[in-house]
Image (cartoon, grey):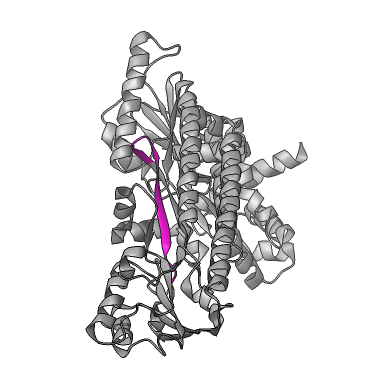
Amino acid sequence: MQLKDALARAPLLAGKVVAGEDYVAKDISWVQIVDHPDLESWVKEGHLLLSTGYNWPKSGKAAAVIVEMLAAKGVCGVVLAVPHFLDHFPASSVQAARRVGMPLIEIPWEVPFSEITHAIHQELIDQQSRALARSEQIHRELTEAAVSGHSLNEVAQVLGRVLDRSVYIHSVDGISLASHESPSSGAGAPREEYLVTNVFFTLKDSGGMAQIDGAPHPIRLPGPLGQEQPGLIGYAVRVRTERVGYIIVAEGSHAVSMLDLRAIEHAGTVAALQISHQRELSMQETRLGYALVASLIEGYFEDKPQALERALLSGWNSKKQYRLCTVLLDEPNPLSRDGFVKREEFAVRVRQSLERRNIRPLLSLSANQIHILVPDEIDADTWWTEFSPTRMAMAVSQIQVGIDGMRAAGSETAELIDHLRPGRVHHFEEMLFPRVLSGDIQAKQAFITRLFDPLKKSKRSHHLLETALMLAEEGFHLQRSAEHLGIHISTLRYRLGRISELVGLDLDSAEGRFRLQVGARLYLMEETM
């Protein structure tokens, strides 16, 4: 309970603050009634002193010194009953109180001290009871989150709910692992989007993360959007001495209490348990054959929160774009002992190469192939030069995203395996048309789908598909095509531009027109079968 709260209710409501008005936001730990000599010997930090004025110095230096000594002991305020032994606080006491920030309150003599002590002590007891009940609630809910072990999102939601604040959990490299936005955070709280995407790196650049790393307990930091924004509470999640993540709490419009800080520490322990458990699961998956990447590219990855969370901790982000690079070793199947050694050695080189770029390695080993998920910002051809000269070959998928995209990437590189040449990099896009011309059934299906699905899904699918087939049939003779379609030639030119844009071919070039003509012939053959 703070002094300002006590002053706002009976019986202290009848009092008048004569000094230290700006310092009433002090916590009251106890109410002490003392009129003995040497008042400072009878009080402790946080005490609210009630005095009749019997032994209070009447004036002069002594009246100032007593205030200074009480302030040095940490007394939160002095209440004087007037008029009786004193009509008012001495002027020197008031001046000293203003100088040292000590609230002085005068209250009518008729107000019994027993009513003041009873009201404040009752509120202190009630506050402790509420704190104990809330502590029990926090302990119970966080313990349930630890026992259930469902996900870090549950930890963030439980902590955010019991604190009524927004909570964010980040990995050590800044990836958002879980979050809870408090519905009562209000317009004054930092925006969730900023906290999720930028706060980690803002704190890192400003030295805030270093402060969190060096503190064994949660610490308060300034708001990321400037002094006009509420602050943040940061806490490093540790497994033994290793940092494995961070909990960041938006302070909101009211300051955090010691109970809130203990709740954040408790949540950090639960998060550490969850991360340790998920790491162990990930290590088991790695020991069982790089199961994460294998499950993604082979199509049996389970789209569940726990699996996605483990994947995120392992470095795979379902919203990020990747290419699958499948390396074909210069070794026959089944692998010999030397072949296994060569595969492991090359996998180590791949890991080291990616780690030098601050990229989490995502790979799996299968027979004489190594599958690597590479972020789209890495140029596969340039990266491959690190391993040259070599007789190994590499197939590269199109850019894909998400669970379905990883499965598609796996299918694309699998289709290229039989067409790889030693020492070369082969991209799915580049190899597709030559494979069509060589009679590859899978390539033919992929080629038809790639050309005509965008036309079928467009707003005026019938007109565009009909126009593409007619242009191919008429050898791109615009006048004849327009007459057969019954449209103006300017309309045909517009459609031609849309078709070129949708299918990704330059239809002003002979190469682009030839590919569309081949695709149209294959499409019509499929339709008539």
- Residue at (65, 41) in percent of width and height: 522
Q: Nearer the viewer, residue 282 or 23?
A: 23
- Is any part of residue 529 visible from this angle? yes
Residue 211: quadrant of the picture: bottom left
Q: Position of residue 436 (x, y in %)?
A: 56, 36
Quarter of the picture holding the C terminus: top right
Q: Would residue 144 appear left or right of 292 to someone viewing this image?
A: right
x, y percentage for residue 161?
60, 55
Q: Is 468 situated left or right of 297 in this image?
A: right
Location of residue 334 in the rendering, given as x and y in whole percent from the top left corner? 45, 11
Residue beneath the point at 40% across and 31% down = 394
Residue ranking furthest to the left:
61
| Span colored in magenta | 229-243
Q: Please state the horizontal and vertical placement of residue 236, each as a whole percent of the image.
A: 38, 47
Toward the viewer: 205 or 186? 186
**In the image, 78: left or right of 7?**
left
Q: Nearer the viewer, residue 349 or 459?
A: 349
Q: Is residue 316 visible?
A: no
